[in-house]
């Protein structure tokens, strides 16, 4: 849409550039981003500076994966004519807003943030938490408000970050005496997080239980073969459990034939349906889903210069928008101007 007055609600979301995206990202966010890109004005942030907050020891990984994530976006159907894809480190206004916002949040509030608490534990930081990591929710508040986003599609685990953002928004609005920043709402996907193929709670590349969006046909076959089912379901004739059965969880996420799926569940529960048969069905679905994504991805990856152009253009647009917010806020706070 190129009309000069764009009244669509604004979405900002993004991903840390720490590795190529996988099927969990597809089910949890990429699919809905593709679906929302016409009804909403959508900005996607390649969050490389946020990725550094827990990868400062490996900036090369963060750098390398910028294009990988961009390839994934384009491969699943993010249309650069509809969605603005931009690079966080190319938007200095975000860093400056972060610095200003840091004065409107306390260290103890940051330490109480449930997302951060869990992540600190997961990463084993213990007492050696990088200050940048503790403060990344403030940077994320800067991301969201700089774009004046009102809708932020994120996983459930990120909901406390939106709350934190809105607290900062209210503090600043109170400080300047008007609603200069807008509050945002988290849009949590209806489907829960996709488990790993091994049945562990979370699909993640580092756990080796993920199916990447560029997985080859053989890798898909192998992953489905390894998939965790019901360990007590030994023979096809045995009754089986659906709950916690990864094959059925994936079918719930990816099958578009609800009736067929209900029938399969019913037969599996009753006994008389073997794992191999259900897995073959899931494999067909995943092969069909991923084949065009893999092909499109390969085409983009063969033309990195073209993709770079998309990021450059998107970042220019994003720069304008974020700098406008920063300029307004600087003025409202009454910072000294040298002009
Ligand atoms: N925190 C998100 C992640 O871990 C990435 C991100 C950075 C983001 N800035 C954002 C998400 C702003 C939504 C809005 O993947």
Image (tube, helix red, strand yellow):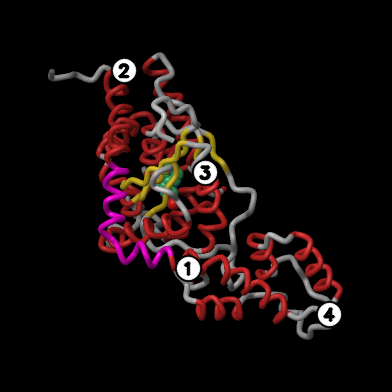
Depth check, front residue: 201 or 23: 23
Where residue 230 appears, as percent x and y from the top left, is 72, 75
Q: Based on the picture, tell me whether residue 216 belongs to the magenta stretch.
A: no
Q: Position of residue 177 (x, y in %)?
A: 40, 14
First in sequence, mark 4 or 3: give its number.
3
Is 277 placed above or below 126 here?
Answer: below
* C-alpha separation, residue under disc 2 versus residue under disc 1: 46 Å
Q: Secondary structure at mark 3?
A: strand
Closest to the observer: 109 or 157? 157
Which of the numbered marks, if any, corresponds to residue 6? Answer: none
From the Cβ of disc 3, is ligand 1 less than 8 Å away?
Answer: yes
Q: Mark on residue 332?
A: 2
Q: Does any portion of residue 111 appear in the rendered image?
A: yes
- The residue that disc 1 covers is 212
Q: Secondary structure at mark 1?
A: loop
Magenta-tinted stretch: 296-315
Q: Are marks 1 and 3 in contact (CB under 8 Å)?
A: no
**Would you name the residue on which mark 3 appears?**
153
Task: Count residues near mark 3 (Cα–Cα under 10 Å), then give few for <14, some for 14-19, many for 20+.
Answer: many
């Amino acid at each position: 849409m190129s009309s000069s007055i764009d009244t669509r609600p604004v979405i900002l979301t993004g991903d840390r550039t720490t590795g190529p995206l996988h099927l969990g990202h597809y089910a949890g966010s990429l699919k809905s981003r593709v679906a929302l890109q016409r009804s909403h004005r959508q900005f996607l942030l390649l969050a490389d500076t946020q990725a550094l907050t827990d990868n400062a020891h490996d900036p090369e990984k963060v750098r390398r994966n910028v294009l990988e994530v961009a390839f994934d976006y384009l491969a699943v159907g993010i249309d650069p004519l509809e969605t603005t894809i931009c690079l966080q480190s190319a938007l200095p206004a975000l860093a400056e807003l972060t610095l200003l916002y840091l004065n409107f949040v306390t260290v103890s509030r940051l330490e109480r943030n449930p997302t951060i608490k869990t992540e600190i534990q997961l990463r084993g930081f213990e007492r050696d938490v990088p200050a940048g990591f503790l403060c990344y929710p403030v940077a994320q508040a800067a991301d969201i408000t700089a774009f004046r986003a009102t809708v932020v599609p994120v996983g459930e685990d990120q909901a406390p970050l939106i709350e934190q953002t809105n607290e900062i928004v209210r503090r600043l609005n109170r400080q300047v005496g008007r609603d200069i920043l807008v509050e945002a709402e988290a849009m949590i996907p209806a489907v829960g997080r996709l488990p790993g193929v091994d049945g562990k709670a979370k699909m993640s590349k580092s756990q080796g239980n993920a199916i990447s969006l560029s997985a080859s046909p053989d890798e898909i076959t192998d992953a489905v073969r390894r998939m965790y089912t019901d360990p007590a379901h030994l023979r096809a004739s045995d009754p089986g459990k659906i709950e916690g059965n990864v094959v059925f969880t994936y079918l719930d996420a990816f099958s578009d034939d609800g009736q067929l799926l209900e029938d399969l569940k019913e037969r599996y529960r009753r006994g008389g349906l073997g794992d191999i048969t259900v897995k073959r069905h899931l494999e067909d679905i995943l092969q069909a889903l991923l084949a065009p994504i893999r092909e499109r991805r390969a085409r983009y990856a063969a033309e990195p210069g073209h993709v770079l152009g998309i990021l450059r253009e998107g970042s220019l647009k994003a720069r304008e928008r974020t700098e406008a917010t920063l300029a307004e806020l600087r003025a409202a706070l009454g910072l000294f101007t040298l002009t």
